[in-house]
């Protein structure tokens, strides 16, 4: 019943409720491009297990693990994780995420990990990325971690930039560039 999911469906995303729906008869159900060449398929795995909290988390973890394994093996996917901390810690999939963060590039897999609490993510989350989008945080631990994770960017300078961000502004950081690139931008509805 999440509005985000219904919005994505209206925009052409395919919503699947389990990793099993990604395969049918041993073949990729959503592989490659749309038949008419409109571009890559856009899929949302939105599992909705039932039962107790423990049962639901176990089912979710298995579903996400199966999906990540399949996408890792196939390569050439962009995987977006909303609430990477939940996937890493609560679902206990840190090892799988670390494999994607460290080895995904070689299979053409891009991992976009979103988190409201970056200081709680494993080191792998911010030691391997090519780019960061950093939004301000009022939590001192997160603000400190955000400044530290900028890779080659000067932490003091980055901390100052983060403190000056207005609502809806963010920093684009390319930490692997020499020198590191830090650009300010803004989220808009256009």
Image (tube, rainbow, N blue to C red):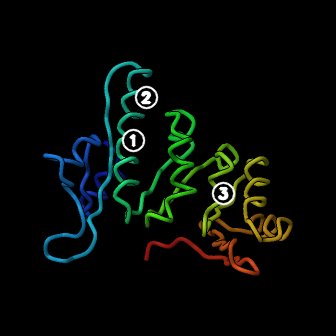
Relative image position of residue 35 (x, y in whole percent)? 14, 71
Query: For the residues carrying marks 3 and 2, which lies nearer the camera in this image?
Result: 3
**Residue at the spot x=53%, y=33% of the render?**
90
* Marking on residue 57: 2
> Label 1 crowding class (10 Å Cα cut-off): few <14, some 14-19, many 20+?
many
Secondary element type, mark 2: helix
Alpha carbon of mark 3 to alpha carbon of mark 2: how far? 25 Å
> Above or below — where is 122 with respect to 61?
below
- Between 167 and 103, the one lying in front of the other is 103
> Label 2 crowding class (10 Å Cα cut-off): few <14, some 14-19, many 20+?
some
> Above or below — where is 131 with respect to 44?
below
Residue 175 relative to residue 144: left or right: left
- Between 5 and 127, the one lying in front of the other is 127
The mark nearer the N terminus, 3 or 1, is: 1
* Marking on residue 17: none
The residue that mark 1 highlights is 64
The residue that mark 3 highlights is 126
């Amino acid at each position: 019943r999440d509005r985000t999911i219904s919005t994505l469906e209206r925009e052409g995303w395919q919503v699947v409720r389990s990793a099993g729906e990604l395969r049918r008869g041993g073949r990729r159900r959503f592989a490659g491009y749309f038949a008419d060449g409109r571009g890559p398929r856009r899929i949302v795995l939105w599992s909705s297990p039932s039962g107790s909290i423990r049962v639901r988390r176990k089912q979710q973890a298995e579903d996400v693990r199966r999906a990540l394994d399949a996408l890792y093996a196939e390569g050439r996917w962009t995987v977006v994780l909303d609430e990477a901390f939940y996937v890493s810690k609560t679902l206990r999939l840190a090892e799988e995420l670390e494999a994607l963060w460290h080895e995904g590039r070689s299979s053409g897999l891009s991992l976009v990990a979103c988190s409201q609490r970056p200081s709680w993510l494993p080191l792998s989350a911010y030691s391997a990325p090519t780019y960061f989008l950093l939004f301000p945080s009022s939590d001192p631990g997160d603000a400190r971690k955000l400044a530290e994770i900028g890779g080659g960017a000067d932490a003091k300078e980055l901390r100052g930039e983060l403190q000056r961000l207005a609502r809806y502004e963010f920093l684009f950081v390319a930490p692997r560039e020499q020198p590191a690139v830090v650009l300010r931008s803004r989220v808009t509805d256009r």
